[in-house]
Image (cartoon, coloured by chain):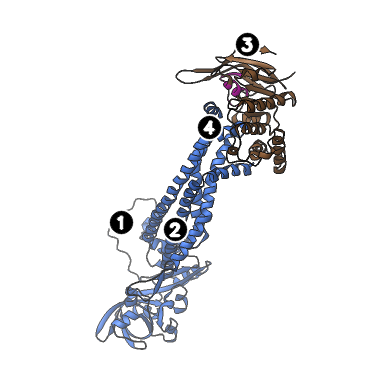
Chain colours: A blue, B brown
Amino acid sequence: MTPLLVSVAMRHLLARKRQSLVSLMGIVLGVGFFLAISAMMQGSEADFIRRLVDNSPHITLQDTYRNPTAQPVAQAYPNAVIAIRRVKPETETRGIRGYARILDAIRARPGLRASAVLTGQALINFAGRDVAVTLNGIVPSEYTGVSTIENYMVAGTLEDLNSNQDGIIIGDQLAHDLSLERNENISVTGTANQTRTFKIVGLFHTGRLNVDSSQAFVQRKRVQALMDRANRVNSIIVKANDPYVARDEAARIEQRFGYKSVSWQEASEDIMNTLMIRNIIMYTVVSAVLIVAAFGIYNVISTVVLEKRRDVAILKSIGFRARDIEWIFLLQGVILGTLGNLMGLPLGSLMMASLGGLEFKLPGSSDVVRLPIDWSWQQFAIAGGFALFAAVLAAFLPARKAARLRPVDILRGGT
Amino acid sequence: MTAVLEAEHLTRRLPGEVVVTLVEDVSLQIQKGEFVAINGPSGSGKSSLLYLLGLLDLPTSGAVRLNGEDMSHSGEDQLARARLEHMGFVFQSHFLLPEFSTVENVALPMRRLGKLDDTEIVRRATEILETLGLKQERHKLPKQLSGGQSQRVAIARALGNNPAIILADEPTGNLDTKSSAIVQGILKGLAREHGRTVVVVTHDPQFAAQADRIITIVDGRILHPSYT
């Protein structure tokens, strides 16, 4: 039954080989370009997000609340109309209270790692120069779990802060600016006006100038002392094995502890929006290629339908149903779409391979850059699926027209 | 005897600004195994009557009965099924599918019905072609056949599903005298020797004269039924 319809459809296409071949080539090129471009764009997006996700905390707990705390009277009468003027918030030592409890709670969640950090501004005095830095007070063993800084160390390790409690790790740019080297001593003045001497135990190079010239890492206890904020931290950094749970986990943490918790998606919402717009533009362009190809298919199948009116009439009078006739022409779209995929997807893979093989050297950098290509099966499925859909849709209109032909109209004119 | 095909007050009009009446108030009965010729001048509506009897077209009013069952209110699929199982058509043009060989063309209705397997279908198609003297031509394409041969292949195709009724619309209209005589002989033989009902539209009086009965149509109406 169906093989019969397939064989009729095949004969129709084979009867006008050149026309079928041209429309087939349209689909082949369309699928190829669709696949290659989409794989390249998705690859670069994935690469971009990976860098973004790797180098930034997945969730950051801050020592602030999203909304100001309610006044006691407002808490007592939640439904009353209350106006209090000139409220001055209570003076208190800033920071996250009871962070050890929060850390335990976060670490109890599967796949989450957390580290408490006290960050503050400080001045480094050396050879008569003052340079402002951001001092990150960390516990090295827990901080390595949530940060990639360890990968960027060019001298020493984060663990060296344990062996020398008065150690400091600074960026290589800062060291260069101040003509400092490893194992030299510098004095650091905190906001509480205390000064301490630290020994440089390590240097890092991230490639981002503002990080390399202004960030420094020391033991958390030292920062707490320098800032006069014993037992406080002002942020908790969380990394997750699966970065995409960050949004939900951040909401849970915020709901439970009240502190503002920002997921990486929230922190980089503008970038995510840009990426989405870029995707929309890209798919619009590559779809246009396939839509043009679909017109080729529409063209060949409507020509076939026009030429085959007599055949349709006799098939119907023999006892083929309207559905059967419709299928004959729909199948031609399916055949062209499938053949287009069979040839177009390998063509696209070839283009992907050659694009992925290109090597670029950015000016001023010694690093060789390759185009990131997304080889996942989804890319093939989207390109192949869209091509088949376009081909079948293009066949649908002429097929409907053929199915509606009344044999009597053609027999009257034909005899 | 039982009426295989029966028309009752059959009327077919084409709607439009000027309504054209193709067939008007035709009632007739065709018995099993009968060989009926429908004749009349060009444009008299004889082909239209055949399309109505062959369930290719539906009447504006009146009824067509196939084996006693009124088909005039059936859906398209039901009509297609009835044509597939009970009827075989032969037209003035052979309407063979040009991409299919002779034997494949004959096999089409059998493959659509799907009651036999592929080897059986080819065997039966070859057999039918052989009885019509076309076994040598079975692998040829329609364009390699003469007009008379093509028309015989069309008859072979109509016989595929062993239908009780053969409907032919000017089957000899495009043929030379010799081929015409062969086709006439085949159609007559189908009725006389194989007990099939054969309805032929023709304006060839010599062909019509061989039928059991001649129905003459003028302006869409039966002029006068005459029996031989």
The answer to the question of whether label 1 and label 4 lie on touching residues, with beta carbons closer than 8 A, is no
- Seen as rendered, the residue at the extreme left is A128
User: As shown in the figure, which amino acid type bears the numbered disc 1?
Assistant: Ile
User: As shown in the figure, which amino acid type bears the numbered disc 4?
Assistant: Leu
Toward the viewer: B220 or A214? B220
Q: Nearer the viewer, mark 2 or mark 3?
A: 3
Residue named by callout 1: A84
Q: Is residue A168 placed above or below B169 in the rendered structure?
A: below
* Mark before the other along the chain sequence, 1 or 2: 2
Q: Nearer the viewer, mark 4 or mark 2?
A: 4
* Mark before the other along the chain sequence, 4 or 2: 2
Residue named by callout 2: A38
The answer for how far apart the CA atoms under marks 1 and 2 are is 58 Å
Count residues near mark 3 (Cα–Cα under 10 Å), then give few for <14, some for 14-19, many for 20+: few
Residue B73 placement: quadrant = top right
Look at the image and tell me whether residue A394 can be seen.
yes
What chain is tagged by disc 2? Answer: A
Say what secondary structure mark 4 lies in. loop
Say what secondary structure mark 1 lies in. loop
Q: Nearer the viewer, mark 3 or mark 1?
A: 3
Q: Position of residue A342 (x, y in %)?
A: 53, 55
Q: Position of residue A169 (x, y in %)?
A: 38, 81
- Which quarter shows the C terminus of chain B? top right
What label does residue A405 carry, if any? Answer: 4
The answer for how far apart the CA atoms under marks 2 and 3 are is 76 Å
The answer for how far apart the CA atoms under marks 4 and 3 are is 35 Å
Whether residue B200 appears in magenta in the rendering, the answer is no
Give, as a single range, the part of the protein colored magenta.
B47-62
User: As shown in the figure, which amino acid type bears the numbered disc 3?
Assistant: His
Toward the viewer: A296 or A366? A296
What chain is tagged by disc 4? Answer: A
